[in-house]
C-alpha cells in the first residue's frame, strides 16, 4: 500500500497556527498519512514584493512543524522552473516518489478559483482534493466532483498578511504562530 501524502502548498509568509491545525487535522481525521508543506518560491497569483526568501520561509516552516512526526517541510519547488505551477510539481513528485500517493489539501477559496489554475483539469481528474472551510466562503459546483472531499476541519480566521501587518505595527502576534517559528521571525526581525 502506497503511503498517502497530502500536499499543502503555500507561500507560508509566515506559517501560522491555522496551517499547523489544518495539517494535523488531515493526518488525524482523513486517510492521509503525512502532510508535506510545499513552500512555493513564487505563487503565480501573488505579488513577490513582500515575500521573505524561500530559504527563510522553509526554515520557519521546518521549525514550526519539527515536533510533529507526520508533518514535513518540502523545498521541492525551489529547484523547479518559476513561476511554479501545481500540475508540474505533481508530475515531478510522481516521478521522484513512485512509491507514494499524492493528494492536495486546499481551502474552499482555492477550490472555487481552481478553474483559473494552469491545467486544472489534469489535477482534478488525477488527484484527490481535501478541502477545508474558509470563513465566509461558500463552495461552488466543484465540491460535487468525484475527487473532491470536503472536510469538517476547524475554520481558521488567521492570515499571514494580518500577521505581517501586525508585526510592522509593533503588535505581539506570538500567540498566532508556533512559538519556534515566531522566535525565528522575531530574532531575524522579519516584516518590521
Image (cartoon, grey):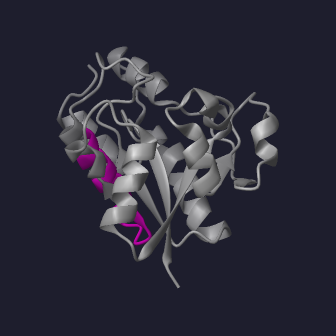
Q: In which quarter of the image is the C terminus?
A: top left
Q: Position of residue 58 (x, y in %)?
A: 26, 46
Q: Where is residue 78 in the image (x, y as percent from the top left)?
A: 23, 43
Residue 97, relative to residue 56: is it above or below?
below
Residue 1, relative to residue 123: is it above or below?
below
Q: Residue at x 25, y 43 (%)?
A: 80
Give the camera-side residue of 56 and 118. 118
Instruction: Classify residue 151 by image quadrant.
Output: bottom right
Give the camera-side residue of 49 and 153. 49
Q: Which residue is drawn at 40% across and 37% down?
A: 85
Count of all numbered marks drawn on residues in the image: 0
> Is residue 131 covered in magenta?
no
Q: Where is residue 76 in the image (x, y as percent from the top left)?
A: 28, 52
Give the camera-side residue of 24 and 103. 103
Give the camera-side residue of 71 and 165. 71
On the picture, is 146 further left or further right than 161? right
Residue 78 in view, yes or no? yes
Q: Which residue is drawn at 29% across and 45% down?
A: 77
On the picture, is 135 further left or further right than 66? right
Residue 26, relative to residue 176: is it above or below?
below
> Is residue 61 covered in magenta?
yes
Residue 150, relative to residue 157: is it above or below?
below
Q: Residue at x 39, y 38 (%)?
A: 12
Residue 150 in view, yes or no? no
On the picture, is 22 further left or further right than 96? right
Q: What stretch is highlighted in magenta?
A: 57-72
Amino acid at each position: 500500500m502506497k503511503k498517502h501524502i497530502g500536499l499543502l502548498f503555500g507561500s507560508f509568509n509566515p506559517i501560522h497556527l491555522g496551517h499547523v491545525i489544518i495539517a494535523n487535522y488531515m493526518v488525524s481525521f482523513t486517510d492521509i498519512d503525512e502532510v508535506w508543506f510545499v513552500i512555493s518560491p513564487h505563487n503565480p497569483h501573488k505579488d513577490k514584493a513582500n515575500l521573505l526568501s524561500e530559504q527563510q520561509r522553509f526554515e520557519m516552516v521546518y521549525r514550526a512543524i519539527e515536533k510533529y512526526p507526520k508533518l514535513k517541510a518540502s523545498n521541492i519547488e525551489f529547484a523547479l522552473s518559476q513561476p511554479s505551477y501545481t500540475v508540474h510539481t505533481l508530475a515531478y513528485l510522481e516521478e521522484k516518489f513512485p512509491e507514494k500517493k499524492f493528494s492536495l489539501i486546499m481551502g474552499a477559496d482555492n477550490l472555487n478559483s481552481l478553474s483559473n489554475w494552469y491545467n486544472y483539469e489534469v489535477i482534478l481528474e488525477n488527484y484527490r482534493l481535501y478541502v477545508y472551510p474558509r470563513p465566509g466562503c461558500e463552495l461552488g459546483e466543484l465540491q460535487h466532483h468525484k475527487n473532491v472531499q470536503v472536510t469538517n476541519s476547524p475554520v481558521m480566521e488567521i492570515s499571514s498578511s494580518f500577521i505581517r501587518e501586525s508585526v510592522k505595527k509593533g503588535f505581539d502576534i506570538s500567540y498566532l504562530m508556533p512559538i519556534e517559528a515566531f522566535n525565528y521571525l522575531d530574532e531575524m526581525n522579519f516584516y518590521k
